Image (tube, rainbow, N blue to C red):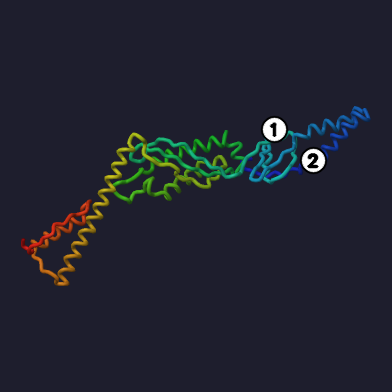
Amino acid sequence: MNNEKAYSPVSGYVMLAIIAVLFIGGIWGLIVARTMWLILPLVISIVLMPGFFFVNPNGSMVLVLFGDYQGTVKTNGFFWVNPFFMKKSFSLRARNFDSDKIKVNDKVGNPIQIGVILVWQVHDTFKAAFDVDNYETFVKLQTDSAVRLLAGLYPYDNFDTDSEVTLRSAHEEVNHALEENLRNRLEIAGIRVIEARIGHLAYAPEIAGAMLRRQQAAAVVSARFKIVEGAVSMVQMALEHLAQQQIIELDEERKAAMVSNLMVVLCSDKDVNPVVNTGTLNH
């Protein structure tokens, strides 16, 4: 037997009534009738008492008799089974596991800190009870191993192009890969992975400052590129509009001066202070 199977126990209320009758009868026989053979119901009732147990909602009870797996009770209620059964309860509720922030190297070798949030639950009590020593410890260790593997598959960020999948940008793809990895790892312990996602992601402290400056520099370059691109378009549009409306005819030298002035105005970080020419165009 290597799979979970259901077990149907006896109602605890029925057995409670029977054991109560045996117990009271044994006490009566011992005290009132003073007949020694009537002590037998008292002994039987005491032997049967350990067979009682109850199962809460989203709970279960694994039953084993002298090393032989008998089954799992997942029905809620008050029950009685063979008092010689070993009973071990398992919660079937969904649980959250927020892993510790571990330091690993990403795909390009940069040290990063990463942590994950895992939502899981037990779905096969036989595997959780007998295929691993401690299923909760197994979840923690396998999650740690999966995080280390995930970090080595992707770079933290890519400053040169947006085409490559990174830990910081491709959340859906990275989280899906993490979830599939954990699902394969934890199946051996009868664990169902409900959700797995990165909960913490940052550069390691020793390179965080340098990487921040690099990100800022990349952002500045990108912003400047957009500004220059927009300024060129605006200058081109201005020259074409002047030519179409025939507002003023400019030679190449004056076009060059106008382009230079417009580019300075549009690309400058600060407000421009214009110099007003009160003479002619040539002076």
Q: Quadrant of residue 215?
A: top left
Left or right relative to 214: residue 87? right
The residue labelled by disc 1 is 66
Point out residue 133 in the picture as x, y percentages from the top left corner.
57, 33
Circle count: 2
- Numbered mark located on residue 207 in the image: none
Quadrant including the N terminus? top right
Q: Residue furthest bottom?
A: 245
Q: Is residue 258 above or below residue 88?
A: below
Q: Residue at x 30, y 49 (%)?
A: 161
Q: Residue at x 5, y 62 (%)?
A: 282
Quadrant including the C terminus? bottom left
Point out residue 175 in the picture as x, y percentages from the top left corner.
44, 47
Left or right relative to 12: residue 22? right
* In this view, the mark in front (2 or 1): 2
Q: Is residue 223 above or below residue 126?
A: below
Q: Earlier in the sequence, mark 2 or mark 1?
A: 2
Point out residue 257 in the picture as x, y percentages from the top left corner.
11, 59
Marks 2 and 1, how far apart at CA: 23 Å
Q: Quadrant of residue 72?
A: top right
- Numbered mark located on residue 15 in the image: 2
As helix, strand or loop, the secondary structure at mark 2 comes to: helix
Q: Are marks 2 and 1 in contact (CB under 8 Å)?
A: no
Q: Residue at x 33, y 51 (%)?
A: 163
Three-letter code, disc 2:
Met
Three-letter code, disc 1:
Phe
Left or right relative to 77: residue 90? left
* Residue in front for this viewpoint, 118 or 188: 118
